[in-house]
């Protein structure tokens, strides 16, 4: 949540900071701000609203200097106002910080500082942290060489909570200090310049050499380079940071010829599905090969139960995965909200495998679930899209999505990629248990057919747009699915409410008469996921009950199904596919439906209100 960019080098900081901030705006867009040290002191501009507002304010009076920090905010503590926007200064006005995360004990710290005579200007926890760092800076001797670094470390030892932060101070005009606990921060290393940012997207245009800070790392950057310490000890961290080359091009975060990132990413799913399965299909043995699991065949064979946990879209993918794995591998699977799993005392036997799913690998609740499972001694595997994330570092193994950057707040690739990975996992475990070679080969053929089948769905974008236009009057929608399509109903409803602001609910189809039917009327469309599968006849029966009550019905059906034309008001066809791959095709159709609805209603598709991309705060 929120975006941080900081720069120290030999160039003008403001253009670089604003460019990076634009690339991070999907992480928060309630307000933004920028501060620069230029030899005259600390200069700062903050504005409510999108980054365009900040750029407009800076236009006539740019801030000159080669050291600066900036931030785009998703409000947690305090309203989205100019005074609450970052950067925040200390009592002297000489120190400025930008901060992602939540300082849980800020109330206690604030009370302590008030007792010392400090007066606060904002409602935020970040200002409290700025005052605390400033307090320690002022208590140190002015001749202290590493004064800002020491002040940051002393302050953070009193902090309970999460943070990714960068601090600068007028009295040390060639130094910036970054620290991380629970909120990502990456160091970008270039010739004669360094960056700190919350995401590599902000700095990929200027350096491909990066190091991801670990929890409790504190990095001090000056004109000569950088040094690393840890909050767990004062001495320099001899282990150092792990330097890596990122495979991320700035062009990956551009819209190209598409009007929105979301539409671009919907259309990229032909490629993202190919990337997710590339090198992972073994035709000779008719199975999947997932070497990153770090489990021997015997260990995989010994799994008696799987628990999948995640949040939002990842959770919905897990619900689809539950049905897929149980169907293909006959291994019992349960799906838990990560926010609940991390707090409850769930009994897990020793042969339970925990799978955690997160696009960013930094989702706070998902990381909490991961750590709770490991605390109990269970093997934990991850499915994520960020190879340098906390999730990737803390799990015992896992599978990368290789979906590429996802900029739009509403996830698309990050739903279908883990879903196909669950198919791979089901194939792998199934071939170890009861699936024959011929059955395994059929599954592989279905997987390989998916990219072309997704293309067929994408070609219907114009038709789907017409359906969205027809129902754009709606204030509420119902989504229904059975078995493997149930998770798609949940995800379809989530996409609709996220970006169109139409109230939408997803339900198991059979639950219609258990209360949901009370919502049915002529102004409430129902979306029925009813491909030609084992539940088709039951779905048609429920669909007819909606029609009997004058409810409009939009059906997602299998190509060639003529009967559905007599039942539903509108039909979106998907190619004929097995039950375990058809959900991906349904998902793509519903992504397009939500997208077109949002555009018709004039919504800000890529930056829906009140939402941000990565939920790194609880």
Image (tube, grey):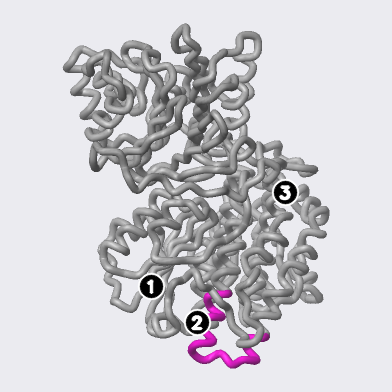
Nearer the observer, 459 or 481:
459
Residue at the disc numbered 2: 429
Q: Image point 42% across, 16% down: which residue?
A: 173
Q: In the rendered structure, does residue 93 fall within the stretch colored magenta?
A: no
Residue at the disc numbered 3: 264
Task: Categorize mark 1 by other alpha carbons within 10 Å: few (<14), some (14-19), many (20+).
Answer: many
Name the element at disc 3: helix
CA distance for labels 1 and 2: 12 Å
Toward which corner of the image does residue 102 lie, by quadrant?
top left
Q: Is residue 55 above or below residue 450?
A: above
Name the element at disc 1: strand
Nearer the observer, 359 or 560:
359
Task: Categorize mark 3 by other alpha carbons within 10 Å: few (<14), some (14-19), many (20+).
Answer: some
Name the side, left or right, on which 581 lies relative to 309: right
Q: Is residue 415 above or below residue 611?
A: below
Callout 3 touching callout 1 (CB < 8 Å): no
**Residue, far top:** 40
- Give the mark nearest the N terminus, 3 or 1: 3
Q: Image point 54% across, 87% down: which residue?
A: 431
- Give the mark nearest the N terminus, 1 or 2: 1
Dominant secondary-structure state across the stretch colored magenta: helix
Residue 303 horizontal/vertical position (percent): 39, 80
Total number of numbered discs in the rendering: 3
Q: Is residue 264 above or below residue 518?
A: above
Residue at the disc numbered 1: 353
CA distance for labels 3 and 1: 35 Å
């Amino acid at each position: 949540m929120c975006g941080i960019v900081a720069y120290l080098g030999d160039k003008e900081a403001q253009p670089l900071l604003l460019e990076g901030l634009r690339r991070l705006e999907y992480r928060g867009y309630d307000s933004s701000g920028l501060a620069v040290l230029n030899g005259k002191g600390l200069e700062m501009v903050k504005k409510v609203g999108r980054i365009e507002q900040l750029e407009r304010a800076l236009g006539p009076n740019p801030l000159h200097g080669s050291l600066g920090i900036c931030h785009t905010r998703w409000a947690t503590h305090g309203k989205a106002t100019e005074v609450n926007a970052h950067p925040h200064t200390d009592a002297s006005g000489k120190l400025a910080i930008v901060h992602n995360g939540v300082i849980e004990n800020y109330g206690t710290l604030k009370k302590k500082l008030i007792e010392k005579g400090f007066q606060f200007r904002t409602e935020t926890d970040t200002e409290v942290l700025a005052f605390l760092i400033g307090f320690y800076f002022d208590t140190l001797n002015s001749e202290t060489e590493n004064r800002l670094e020491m002040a940051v470390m002393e302050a953070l030892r009193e902090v309970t909570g999460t943070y990714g932060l960068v601090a600068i101070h007028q009295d040390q005009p060639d130094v910036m200090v970054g620290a991380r606990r629970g909120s990502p921060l990456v160091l970008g290393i270039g010739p004669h310049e360094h960056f700190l940012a919350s995401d590599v997207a902000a700095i990929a245009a200027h350096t491909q050499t990066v190091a991801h800070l670990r929890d409790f790392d504190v990095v001090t950057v000056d004109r000569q380079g950088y040094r690393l310490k840890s909050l767990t000890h004062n001495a320099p961290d001899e282990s150092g940071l792990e330097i890596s080359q990122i495979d991320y091009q700035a062009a990956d975060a551009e819209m190209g010829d598409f009007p929105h990132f979301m539409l671009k990413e919907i259309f990229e799913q032909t490629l993202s599905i190919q990337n997710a399965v590339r090198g992972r299909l073994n035709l000779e043995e008719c199975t999947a090969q997932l070497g990153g699991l770090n489990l021997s065949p015997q260990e995989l064979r010994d799994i008696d139960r799987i628990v999948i946990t995640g949040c939002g879209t990842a959770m919905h993918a897990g619900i689809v995965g539950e049905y897929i794995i149980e169907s293909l591998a006959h291994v019992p699977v349960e799906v838990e909200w990560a926010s609940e799993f991390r707090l409850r005392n769930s009994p897990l036997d020793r042969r339970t495998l925990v799978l955690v799913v997160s696009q960013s690998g930094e989702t706070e609740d998902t990381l909490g679930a991961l750590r709770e499972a490991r605390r109990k001694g269970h093997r934990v595997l991850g499915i994520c899209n960020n190879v340098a994330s906390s999730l990737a570092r803390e799990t015992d193994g896992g599978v990368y999505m290789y979906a590429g950057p996802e900029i739009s707040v509403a996830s698309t690739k990050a739903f279908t990629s883990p879903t196909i990975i669950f198919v791979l996992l089901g194939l792998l475990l199934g071939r170890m248990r009861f699936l024959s070679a011929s059955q395994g080969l059929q599954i592989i053929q279905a997987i390989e057919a998916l990219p072309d089948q997704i293309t067929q769905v994408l070609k219907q974008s114009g038709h789907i747009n017409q359906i969205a236009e027809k129902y754009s009057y709606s204030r509420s929608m119902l989504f229904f699915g059975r078995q493997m399509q149930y998770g798609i109903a949940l995800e379809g409803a989530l996409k609709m409410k996220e970006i169109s602001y139409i109230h939408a609910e997803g339900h198991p189809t059979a639950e219609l008469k258990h209360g949901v039917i009370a919502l049915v009327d002529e102004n409430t469309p129902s979306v029925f996921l009813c491909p030609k599968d084992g539940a088709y006849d039951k779905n048609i029966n429920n669909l007819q009950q909606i029609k009997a009550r004058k409810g409009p019905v939009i059906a997602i059906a299998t190509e060639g199904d003529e009967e559905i034309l007599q039942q539903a008001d509108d039909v979106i066809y998907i190619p004929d596919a097995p039950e375990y791959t058809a959900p991906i095709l349904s998902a793509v159709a519903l992504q397009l439906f939500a997208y077109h609805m949002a555009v018709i209603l004039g919504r800000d598709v890529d930056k829906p209100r009140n939402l941000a991309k990565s939920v790194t705060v609880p």
